[in-house]
Image (cartoon, rainbow, N blue to C red):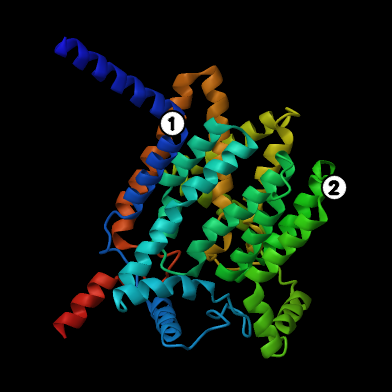
Amino acid sequence: MVILSARKWSQALKNDILITVRKYKTAILIFGIFLLALLLRFLYFPQNIYFGFDQARDAFATLGILKGDLKIVGPPTGVEGLFHGPLYYYLYAPFYFLSKGDPAYAAGFLRVANALGVFLIFLVGKTIFDKKVGFLAAFFFAISFEQTQYALYFNHPSLAVLSVTLFYLGAALLFFKKNQWGLLLSLLGLGLSLQFEFVLIYLILILVILAIVFRKLIFKMELKIMLISLLGFLITVSSFILAEVIFNFRALTNLTSIAGGVGARADILNNIYLLLNRFVSDNIFSYDFGVTWALILSVVVFLVFLKNQNYRPKLIFLLIWILGGIIPYINNRSQTPLYYYSVGAGVGLLVLYSFFIGKAWEKAKVLALVLVLIPVVSNLSLIRQNNPGGVIPTINVQSGMLLSDEKQAVDYI
């Protein structure tokens, strides 16, 4: 009797566990992917924390806030009189306070924040296509070399990965799910993106383009939601508004003069090719002998699916997302364009690639598994080669300025 009761109890426990797993399998799986993302971002931590001039400047600004010197402008941009937002100073502040000035806490926060993008991209994939695409996109985000580099990049643009993804998540909810609150998410994502990297002002143009392209999907919205969304945007950019009033509209004047002076000739096609090549190599396929062919094949497959009217609006949405990241480089004449001006654009490519794999799975499961394995091998190889030394030189020109080495130098002195 005792043995039978124990067996019944054991079987009942197993059944309860199975029921619980089935009920929460989505949450369990996405949380597992999040843990994988954390693992890859905290590899070699804290030895690979980069701490150069910009990081020291921001640390002093953050410590000043803790002493009561509040900031209404962030660090300067490459244009005189224009500044990024100060929000990330305030996000760093609690970690500098808890660590008593040790940058490692704030650097760890950025890695966790980037890993949280797993949840956002899952929602994007699920909203545009289905849950399967959402899981695949989240997995590829977790292992993406590009995203691990943003996680290691101890500077304000790294946080824009989340805000840009939020911007497109809101747009996807608005156009494909008829969810009016998508407008609020999109405008919050826009405002936060301006805080983290001012060049992301190009997202205003993207919003206009999306509204024109998907005008047939736009429906009558409640005035209350529109006003709340506008208020949310104004709150996120309130520091810019306050700074403009205090400094006599200095930034607006500079923006006007820049717009009037645009016209320098640049190799636009070369910039487009360079950026698309980088998106592919840092997210999907990194081997020199095949990056261009992988890009060409992706374009061909994209055009094939574009013929399907059911997929066309969604694919056009992703195309605008990916190519939108090229806008800041159109007038660029540098041989090595700044890496992070396209922050967040590569996320759209991960969603698109996940869609391709989902369709391949329906026809040829072996091919789909190979397409999953290629980014795994490629990204893990890049992470192993590059991440022990921190961020790559195309992000920070002065490579090798690691906090661990600097501490050893101070201890030696």
Instruction: Tell whether 191 sits left or right of 220.
Output: left
Q: Which residue is mark 1?
A: 25
**Of residues 214 and 272, the one drawn nearer to the viewer in this rendering:** 214
**Label 2 CA crowd tier, 10 Å (few <14, some 14–19, many 20+):** few
Task: Give the residue drawn at x 57%, y 77%.
Answer: 77
**Of residues 44 and 179, the one drawn nearer to the viewer in this rendering:** 179
**Of residues 115 and 153, the one drawn nearer to the viewer in this rendering:** 115
Q: Which residue is mark 2?
A: 220
Secondary element under disc 2, as helix, strand or loop, is: loop
Instruction: Tell whether 311 sits left or right of 218.
Output: left
Instruction: Tell whether 269 sits left or right of 87.
Output: right
Sequence-earlier tag: 2 or 1: 1
Give the answer, above or below, for where 186 lies relative to 106. above
Q: CA distance from mark 2 to mark 1?
A: 36 Å
Image position, residue 240 (x, y; %): 65, 78
Task: Give the residue drawn at x 72%, y 90%.
Answer: 248
Image position, residue 352 (x, y; %): 58, 39
Give the answer, above or below, for where 43 lies relative to 319. below
